[in-house]
Amino acid sequence: MKIEKIKTELLIIGGGTAGCYAALTASENADVKILICEKANIERSGCLAAGVNALNAYITEGRTPQDYVDYAKKDAAGIVRDDLLYTMSERLNKVTKRLEELGLVILKDENGRYAARGNRNIKINGENIKPLLAAAVEKLPNVMVLNRVNVIDFSVRDNKINGAFAIGIENDTFYVIEAAAVIVATGGAAGLYKPNNPGFSRHKMWYPPFNTGAGYAMGIKHGAEMTTFEMRFIALRCKDTIAPTGTLAQGAGAKQINSLGEVYETKYGLTTSERVYGTVTENIEGRGPCYLKTKGISPETEESLLKAYLNMAPSQAIKWIESGKKLSEQNVEIEGTEPYIVGGHTASGYWVDTNRATTINGLFAAGDVAGGCPQKYVTGALAEGEIAALSAVKYIAENAADTIDESEINSHISEIKKFTGENHSRFSTERLEEAMQTVMDSYAGGIKTNYRFNEKQLDIADYKIRQLEKLSENLHAEDLQELMYIYELRERLTVCRSVIAHLKARQETRWHSFAENLDYPEKDEKNWNKYVNSRLENGEVKIILRELTKEGQRTYEHSN
Amino acid sequence: MSIAIDKSKCVGCGRCHEVCPGTLIKIGGDKKAYIKYPKDCWGCTSCIKECPVYAISFYLGADIGGMGSMVHTEKKDSLLCWIIDHPDGVKTEIDIDPKESNKY
């Protein structure tokens, strides 16, 4: 394995939505050397690979950023950071404009204004949204992109980040990257829980299966404070294809009905978690399966919907076509996905200040890895990329870069040698991944238990995940891709332990389904209007409870 | 779901290999692309849209209700055309204008 040392000023880990926009912002606002490390290829990587057909976070005419804050706060039952939501919300329209300038097609009304879908959404043709963003990044003179390079660890000394270590997936190179500041934008974590269809279609999931929680895991290992990992995200999706339901529900006005034809959504409430919970409960009580009622929609609507799905989730369009029945002749069955940890939809992730600085000096977080700020969607991730970039650039101007110790380099190389050399394991990485997903499914509130859990189960989950962590130390890789899979599994196991600790810590049920604790089935506003945060200390997840931000609070600084 | 690459059409340009977000597509000794990890496909269809000779199709696994149709896209003037080849030989074509936004 070749060793390559790179010196840069700003390292961006992950060239997805937030990472690309951070590069654009930093490049335009300062004369700094920027390096993007991307596990795939920024052209089609991250959440936008398949495309999207709406921008779900936009301040429509007559609305204000504060309205968006209020909406997101209500949806998360109060466990959000007001300052983070506000600073994101006030940028949503600006970043949208920028996307349009980059070439994104946005639907306009007869007056030339963006056509709204409800109060917060606008409609687009987003099939090529990622290639547009990537092309803009590739034009920047001071940005270097390393595609197919997987970052495996940060370099942190005295709680200050000095860069990162990475391994080529297609070239046999170990990268030592020194940087004055780092933005982590790796996305959230999929693949912790057993998926809806664990066989051939195991990766037909809502969130990118290649987002393995690397950013979370690296931060956790170095003692970064994390928040709200107990607020898992479960998406309500079209059954089997796991395609979006919003286009049918908000776009075409299709209602959630049970197998008796009764509209049940109003019975359980309309927040994101309540919609999932209602569907689960209808099934438990014998009124399943549940559907979105599309029977009887007009031929024009039907055709438009088919095209909309081809642009973002073609498998659902194909499913309709293959079934031989039109969308207007059959309702669309829906189900909840397995749980994910994703800060773009819930509040899980790095504990950051208003500038998106994490608790590790020089490390900033944006997009799905950043916590406290749910309902980001695409535009919110762009907005956070912008904020993090501006903060990182300022930090670079004020702080001198340090070097990485040789000893740290050597310890990583010997670890890699162990995985690719003498290690022997009775189990493959794939088998251990399945074992992890089974543990989480059975004991930490997966699909199997209708997302519910109790403390005893969580204790078993923790015990078993630790066992798997131990087993993972002996895994063997035949090639670079298998080596990446070992690191990914170990990242997921690290995240699992934090999720379990957080689920156990919040002794209430703040959100149905997302964190349904059977030992504490009620919401407890008196004791639990708090953030559940954590930090790894001596190998144990230490829980830290913090007070919620005040209504209208605009800034938050790290303390102790 | 996963993809199938028609070796007789593949010209070995490597575009699919370049764009796959999961690093799942490799170029074999015969200079043709193949999918090394079919179960790991997310179904994003990036490779299908990028293939210049329309050699890649996708299909739904039987575990999620697939009936055996193969799907690919072709560029027709300025339109993106989705072509669904059903197992009984019937073909469905749907044209999408990339300049036209989703209406829902």
Image: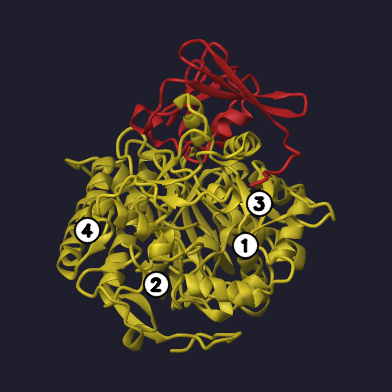
**Residue A481 locus on image (x, y percent):** 40, 39
Name the residue tied to disc 4. A465
Q: Colour of chain A?
A: yellow
Among the two numbered marks 1 and 3 on one chain, the one whose residue lies closer to the N terminus: 1
Q: Could you tell me how far apart the alpha carbons at marks 1 and 2 are, in whole angstroms?
A: 21 Å
Among the two numbered marks 2 and 3 on one chain, the one whose residue lies closer to the N terminus: 3
A281 on left or right of A253: left
Q: Nearer the viewer, mark 1 or mark 3?
A: 1
Q: Residue at x 45, y 60 (%)?
A: A342
Q: Considering the numbered disc 4 on the image, is that residue within a helix, a strand or a loop? A: helix
Among the two numbered marks 2 and 4 on one chain, the one whose residue lies closer to the N terminus: 2
Q: Considering the numbered disc 3 on the image, is that residue within a helix, a strand or a loop? A: strand
Q: Place residue A219 in its image quadrant.
A: bottom left
B102 on left or right of A246: right
**Residue A207 locus on image (x, y percent):** 45, 50
Name the residue tied to disc 3. A144
Among the two numbered marks 1 and 2 on one chain, the one whose residue lies closer to the N terminus: 1
Numbered circles on residues, count: 4
Q: Could you tell me how far apart the alpha carbons at marks 2 and 4 are, in whole angstroms?
A: 20 Å
Among the two numbered marks 4 and 1 on one chain, the one whose residue lies closer to the N terminus: 1
In the rendered structure, which amino acid carries the disc numbered 1?
A: Ala
Determine crowd level at label 3: few under 14, some 14-19, many 20+ residues with C-alpha closer than 10 A. some
* Rendered position, A5 above or below A309: below
Tags 3 and 4 both on a single chain: yes
Residue B3 appears anywhere in the view: no
Q: Nearer the viewer, residue A320 or A154?
A: A320
Name the residue tied to disc 2. A228
Q: Report the chain holding disc 4.
A: A
Mark seen at residue A57: 1
Q: Which chain is red?
A: B
Quadrant in the picture for the N terminus of chain B: top left
Q: Nearer the viewer, residue A156 or A436?
A: A436
